[in-house]
Structure formats: C-alpha cells, structure tokens
Amino acid sequence: MKEITAYLHFKGEAREAMTFYKDCLGGELLFITVGETAMAAQMPAEIQGYIMHSVLKKDNLTIYGSDMVRPGGINIGNHMSLFINCSSEEEINSVYTNLVKDGKPGQPLTEAFWGSIYGDLNDKFGINWMFNYDKEEVINNNHK
C-alpha cells in the first residue's frame, strides 16, 4: 500500500475549509471544481463551482477535501473517509473485497474518468473507505 489519507467532505464549504487548513498548516493547495471535470456537462449548473476534489500537501502531510457527498447529505460517519491509494490492481481488489464484508458497497471498483480504478464502501463499523489505483502511474513508469 502506498498511503492512507484523510478525505474530508463538506456541505459546499470545501474551498473555505481547505483554505483555512492551508492557512493553519502551510503547504500547497489545489482545487478542481465540478465545472473543470469531464463530468461537468452531466452536472447541474448550481454545483459547477463546487469542489470536486482538493488536495493540501506539505511534506508528508496530505489532506483531501470535496463538496461532493452522497444523497442524504452529510451524516455522522460520512463526513470523513479513509482514502487508500493502492499499488496494484490485485491489491485494490483484495482490500475492497475484505473491507466490504458485512458492510455496504457504495461505488463498485470501476474505471474512473480520470484514468484510475476507483471504488468506495461503508464498512461494518460505519467507516467510509475510498480506494484508488492509478494505472497511469504504472504506465508512465514503464515508459521511462
């Protein structure tokens, strides 16, 4: 496994919250809005400015944030997810399969529009997990 990182979910306040964390912790901050993604045309106009994904990075610290939440809004247990960047397709399949036992699958592992395999679930203890395997990184490393 490459890393495990906190992924924070907000009610339209991701930009404000992540900027606050940057001000407090320092580092580099990147935002990607819904309107900047390949999914923009499929999303309602009122959420085009929402943060699809943000990352605050300083040394070994990484915090992800987003305004995107599941239907039903933010509840105790879904305001934060544990985000795992996996090292291989075998690893992402194994970890997802193990953690979904007695839990609730969310997004099954599928090829995402950003070129990775992605999926998420809620484990039997109510913890949200997000999984990513960046196939492009493997392809790029093999062509150096």
Image (spheres, rainbow, N blue to C red):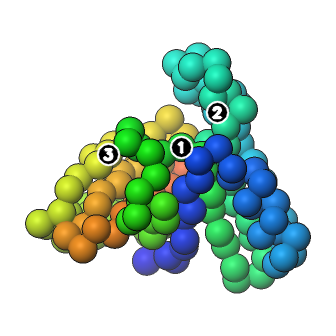
Amino acid, disc 1: Met
Disc 1: which residue: 68
Against 115, residue 57 (above or below) is below
Is residue 142 visible to us here? no
Where the N terminus falls, by quadrant?
A: bottom left
Residue at horizontal 82%, vertical 60%? 19
Seen from the viewer's position, the closer of residues 130 and 18 is 18
| Residue 66 relative to residue 89: left or right | right
**How busy is the neighbourhood of tag 3: few (under 14 within 10 Å), some, or many (20 plus)?**
few
Q: Position of residue 37 (x, y in %)?
A: 64, 31
The type of residue carrying mark 3 is Gln
The residue labelled by disc 2 is 34
Relative image position of residue 109 (x, y in whole percent): 30, 49
Mark 2 and mark 1 residues within 8 Å of each other at the beta carbon:
yes
Where disc 1 sits, the SS reads loop
Residue 72 in the figure: left or right of residue 13:
left
Circles 2 and 3: CB distance less than 8 Å? no
- Report the side of 71 relative to 100 (left or right): right
User: How far is the residue under mark 2 from the one under mark 3?
Assistant: 18 Å
Residue lying at the far bottom of the rendered structure: 60
Which of the two discs, 2 and 1, sits closer to the camera? 1
**First in sequence: mark 3 vs mark 1:** 1
Q: Does residue 87 appear to the left or right of 35 in the view shown?
A: left
At mark 2, the secondary structure is helix
Q: Residue at x 46, y 52 (%)?
A: 74
Instruction: Please state the horizontal and vertical placement of residue 14, each as a whole percent of the image.
Output: 68, 52
The residue under the point 49% across, 65% down is: 80
Q: Secondary structure at mark 3?
A: loop
Q: CA–CA distance between discs 2 and 1?
A: 9 Å
Report crowding for label 1: few under 14, some 14 to 19, many 20 or more residues within 10 A (C-alpha): many
Q: Quadrant of the C terminus?
A: bottom right
Q: Which three-letter amino acid code belongs to the residue tagged 2?
A: Val
